[in-house]
Amino acid sequence: MSVYIVTSVGDIVVDLDTDLCPLTTKNFLKLCKIKYYNGSLFHKVEKDFLAQTGDPTGTGTGGDSVYRFLYGDQARFFRHEIRPELRHSRISTLAMASAGEDCNGSQFYVTLWDDVEFLDGKHTVFGRVSEGFDTLTKINEAYVDGNKRPYKDIRVKHTYILDDPFGDPPQLAELIPEGSPVGRPRDEAAEERLEDSWVPFDETMTPQQLEEMMRSREAHANAVVLESVGDIPDAGVKPPDNVLFVAKLNPVTQDEDLYTIFSRFGTVTSAEIIRDYKTGDNLCYAFIEFETKEACDRSYLEMGNCLIDDRRIHVDFSQSVSRLWSQFRQRKPNSNKNGCFKCGISDHLAQDCDQGVERKNKGPNYVLKDENTQRGGNNRRRYDIVFFDDDDDADQYDCPYPIRRKIQKVNDEGRHDHRNHCKHQSRSRNREDGEYYPMIAAREAKVTTGEDQAGEKTVDAR
């Protein structure tokens, strides 16, 4: 006289005391036969005490005995069968959960601890669990709310009768389904919780997949922190996939050299050697931006450990987002703060921006050398002292800067002889508009006019 019960956390086998409790065990066996318990929740789990189920509504207030289906509503409940020799003395005891004296229906419970003897004489003990104690341990360790209901549903999936000493009443044949029902009971009214089929992610992954997921989440958390402190424009920003990082360069290597070398793989939109912002010294690494990702991939495969200016270079894909950050910081103050900072459109974020859009044509990001010019970095120059003896020389170099002039009046027709002196020194940066202006070797900016004895007119202008 046994029943095999399949639950969502494991299987158990119960042995029934049919000789001592025939009315109770017959009710239990016939309810199992008509699949009445399929899908029933363990609606009450008290740790180290008991686990209760058997109510198709899942609320703990429903459930009918098999006698109601056989003989009508007046037989909904049946009387107790309390025996002195059947006690709540050990774990796995099976007993009926009644709504009062002689009010047994379909609900039953399994004890999860030894010596729960204060229940003796109040509930009918009619069996015990003989196999599946690990399942009882899982049920006992379930997380529950204040009403003792598990947060994750634990259900009775199927019941199979292994041995039944009682014959089937004629009316029972109409109640036996063709197959074992699955899913929730039709009358369930309990609040929805996590389904019994729900499994945490860490239990469905291999250790390698779990480690990769944890690293990805940690990286995203770090990116959010960097975004909040203003170090990156967006937590989802990614390095461009068409930029190559080149390291271990020779200090004599110039931007145009890299442009020429890497152009064999495709169109190079910029080749920029990184320099010290104060001294302009070559820091021996650079970024090469290609027009297409395919060109960048080819150069990565073929240029590794190549020799450039007697140096073995190292190439890798760029992980820098400084250019994107510069674009973000250079936005106009009245521009839309929401949306993509790359293209300025507000209907998507930077991480969703279409990277395949046609890029604007722009020249290489380097400047060819000139005579009397020292390189000082990207768009920077330091000038030696240059003197122009006449206007023709000044026009040849297209000098746009103010010059110190001495003008001599010759005749009334307004003809003049010009002698120009242009002295260029290191530039200072105007912080307001970002342009550069020369520093003229003069103490103060002033304009003086007058006539000397020789009739000469002098003008000092800065």
Image (spheres, rainbow, N blue to C red):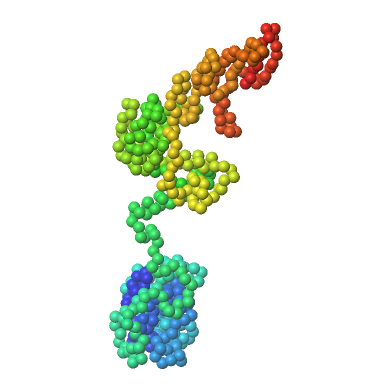
Q: Against 274, is 42 above or below?
A: below
Give the residue furthest to the front.
413
Q: Quadrant of residue 282?
A: top left
Asked whether 317 or 159 is in front, the reply is: 317
Asked whether 446 or 277 is in front, the reply is: 446
Q: Identify the residue at horizontal 35%, vertical 88% (top origin).
A: 174
Image x and y of residue 343, in percent: 49, 46
Image x and y of residue 383, in percent: 50, 21
Q: Can you say which quadrant of the picture contains the N terminus? A: bottom left
Image label count: 0
Q: Against 346, is 150 above or below?
A: below
Judge whether residue 287 can be spotted in this image: no
Q: Against 102, is 302 above or below?
A: above
Q: Identify the residue at horizontal 45%, vertical 37% (top origin).
A: 362
Q: Identify the residue at horizontal 49%, vertical 68% (top origin).
A: 145
Asked whether 337 or 217 is in front, the reply is: 337
